[in-house]
Amino acid sequence: MNLVVSVGNVLLPLLYLVVWVFYIWIFRSDNPLPRRVASRLTAAVVLLHLGALAAKAQLYGRLPLGSGLEFASGLAVALLVTYLYIERRRRVKQTGFMITGLAFLLQFIASAFSVTVPDASPLLHDPGFAGHVVLVLLAYTALTVSFLYAVLYLVLARQLGRRQFGLLFRRLPSLDVLERMSVGAVELGVPLLFLSLSLGHLWMYNLADRVDPALAAELSPWDPKILVSWVILLGYAAGLAGYRLLGWRGRRMNVLAVAAYVVVIVAMGVVQHFVPSFHDFRQQQPREVSLMWPLAPAHDGARPRPGGGGAE
């Protein structure tokens, strides 16, 4: 398993680079060869990356998102998955160079500076928390893609207003299509964020029955990070309602998308660094937590028991 993880660590950034080169080729020349190959190649890279993550999960006995570098790798594959969903819905490949380029950069950093077995929160061994984290990752990736398409919309609109008909004008889809792609990403991100919050609440109440009273007392639905996430969800849902029901279109809608994402980043940064929260998992200690990971290898023939304080 160590060999699989090591090979994946070297191979993945090279595959991401190939995917990026194909989409740059499409953007610059719209050649039929990369148009036929790019989506299938991207899907194959996603499957290989998911296989590498599964190997890491089995090797480490936890969700492989325990450090900033592991999170960057997870974000890279999440970007590809989100992009493939948008591309399939809109049948537009000319914008793929931007998303796949960002994914390549993240995976290159993750592979170049990776460590053998990074220290990680014991909560990552819990399947409920793992599902919550994966949904959160996908949700915020979708919102990131929406932001990128909104930025492309504003850049292209500015060029059109100045009558600058360069490469972006010739190769990018119309403003209407870019707006639909941005909104489509939000339509994917909002239900994912709702599911992640719902699962997070269920996991929190379940965890409270399996930890010591001191840690259980810190678990609260009024946690600042939870409240901010619900506000973000309601804000993006209101934006979708405005788009569908109130006719919000054009520059106003895309400025709102950019502004909303900036608010998300600032709010999450403030909560993460300045507001006390039980979500600061880097500081959590395994205080009598009974956690199980279905792929975890046995250690000395003993496993923690559900509802107990660990192996005897």
Image (cartoon, helix red, strand yellow):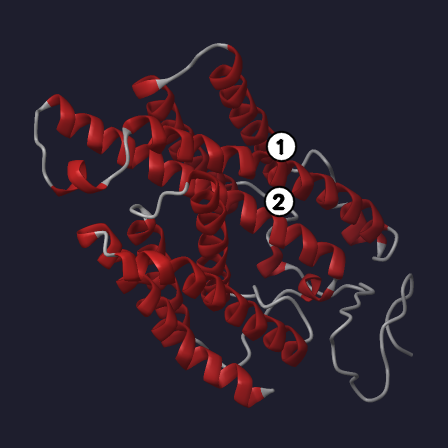
Q: In the picture shown, does residue 102 fall above or below 249?
A: below
Label 2 packing within 10 angstroms: few (<14), some (14-19), many (20+): some
- Indicate which disc residue 25 carries: none
| Of callouts 2 and 1, the N-terminal one | 1
Reading the image, the residue beneath label 1 is 227
User: Which residue is the extreme one toward the top?
Assistant: 246
Residue lying at the far front in this picture: please name it.
32
- Callout 1 amino acid: Leu
Residue 97 lies, in percent from the top left, at: 29, 53
Where residue 208 appears, as percent x and y from the top left, is 83, 50
As rendered, which of 24 and 255 lies closer to the eye? 24
- Name the element at disc 1: helix
Residue at 59% x, 76% y: name it: 56
What residue sits 34% from the left and 40% below the top? 148
Q: Do the CB atoms of the residues marked 2 and 1 lie less than 8 Å apart?
A: no
Residue 286: x %, y % from top left: 73, 66
Residue of label 2: 277
- With 262 as the anchor, is 296 left or right in this view? right
In the figure, 253 relative to 293: above or below?
Answer: above
Give the CA separation, mark 2 to mark 1: 11 Å
Q: Quadrant of residue 301?
A: bottom right
Callout 2 amino acid: Ser
Q: Residue at x 54, y 40 (%)?
A: 275
